Image (tube, rainbow, N blue to C red):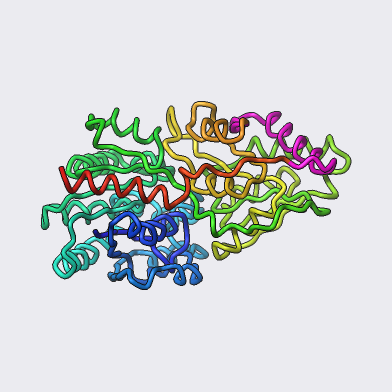
Amino acid sequence: MLLLTYYFPPLAGPGSLRLLSFARELPAWGWDPVVVTARDPGSCERDEMLMERIPRGVRVERARTLEPHGLYRMLVPGARSTDRGHLSSKPRSVSGRLARWVRLNAFLPDSRVGWVPFAVRAARRVVREEGIDCFLTSSPPHSLQLAGLRLKKKTGLPWILELRDPWRSMEHYQEEERTRLARSLDRRLEARCLRAADRIVTTSRDLRRTLLRDHGLAEDKVVVVENGVDPDLFPTTPFRPGDRFRIVHVGSLPASRRPTAFLTGLRQALDESPELPSALELHFVGSVAPEVRQDLADAGLLEYCRFESSLPHREALARLASASLLLATVPVLGDRADLIPAKVFEYMAARRPLLVLARSCDEVHQLLVSWCGEGAVDPGDAPGARRRILEVFENERAGRLPELPPIPERYHRRELAGCLAHVLEEAVVT
């Protein structure tokens, strides 16, 4: 079978990790994958250590890509890419605003669309040479699904379309700069791909419900295969409290996920506890939007902050294991979040206390309740954030360390690959 994905090692990020795990684990379930991915897109974070985990027997074809990131960097000084995290911060210059407008309205569904013809060409070659019996396209970037649509028309092979994140309800797709025409065209592209696919895989039940509701899809066409973890990657040494109370956030923190309630609650906790100010360390691993940094400054929290650029995955997991409290945010979009951030599963596997900002109606809240009995904190509940921070801090100082359960085996990547294998089998047989 063929895995068509933009993100794959050495590119970093949750999408790359998920598809790498499928490439590693599917052979145990009777499927031999071939990977078609992008060749060295210079605008993405890299993690060279992930290359060591690609199985030797897995063929990886890397197709060239044509993207507008060089032009964007000229128009927006200091920008490294047009990825979602950077789009969340609105440029101040006229040229920057123009580049942003063009990005949101001319490149549909997204700026990776220039990869589509090269991906299709490479995928068709693999189909001819390897005797492929089905293929999976995993997005974002959602422009990748246009390659799947073309490949389906050219080959007639069973197509499994995977949405790791929502399509039109992604955070930066909601920007006011998007024209009515761009929104309409994007809706049509999404609908065409969803109709043409033989099976659809999502990573959350909320997104599955949204797709069924908005597109009238058959119940058995849309299947959930959650994000998960590779438990063997996590450090085995137990947590030992030190002189620092570390609150850690791993991953990008865009302006659309500004943790306002957390910052207010933390400021209140600092004012209330005489011991917390001398112990606190706020550790951000990954890109942090300028708006969030300004919020930290406005709350008087910058003196406690430590900012660290993106790390190799193994080192990032070590940061999780050393945290007193792990912070995560879930975007508020419509009546449901439609996603569970992949980092939440890694946070659970680290077995450290969590402060996840999400609504009680969001699926991530129910996930946390079922795991440890304690759910998320509402994004507007500053007192709730203050209580969670002080509770964890006081327990740690008193030596009362929580005994959180291990992450259930159903979220181990090997088991999730088995779920995907079942989807592949159904698509081929049907």
- Quick one: 245 or 282, which is closer to the camera? 245
Residue 427 lies in what quarter of the image?
top left
Kindly tell me whether residue 271 is visible in this rendering: yes
Q: Quadrant of the C terminus?
A: top left
Residue 222 sits above or below residue 322 on the image: above
Query: At 16% across and 45% down in the image, what residue appears?
Result: 429
Residue 333 sits above or below residue 189 on the image: above
Query: At 29% across and 56% down in the image, what residue appears?
Result: 30
Q: What stretch of residues is rendered in magenta?
A: 374-401
Query: At 61% across and 30% down in the image, what residue appears?
Result: 373
- Quick one: 288 or 102, which is closer to the camera? 288
Q: Is residue 381 magenta?
A: yes
- Residue 38: image x %, image y %? 33, 66
Q: Quadrant of the N terminus?
A: bottom left
- Residue 418: image x %, image y %? 36, 49
Residue 381 lies in what quarter of the image?
top right
Residue 219 lies in what quarter of the image?
top left
- Quick one: 103 or 211, which is closer to the camera? 211
Query: At 50% across and 68% down in the image, what residue appears?
Result: 47
* Direction from residue 248 to residue 153 in the image, left or right: left
Q: Is residue 192 magenta?
A: no
Q: Residue furthest right?
A: 274
* Direction from residue 109 to residue 50 in the image, left or right: right
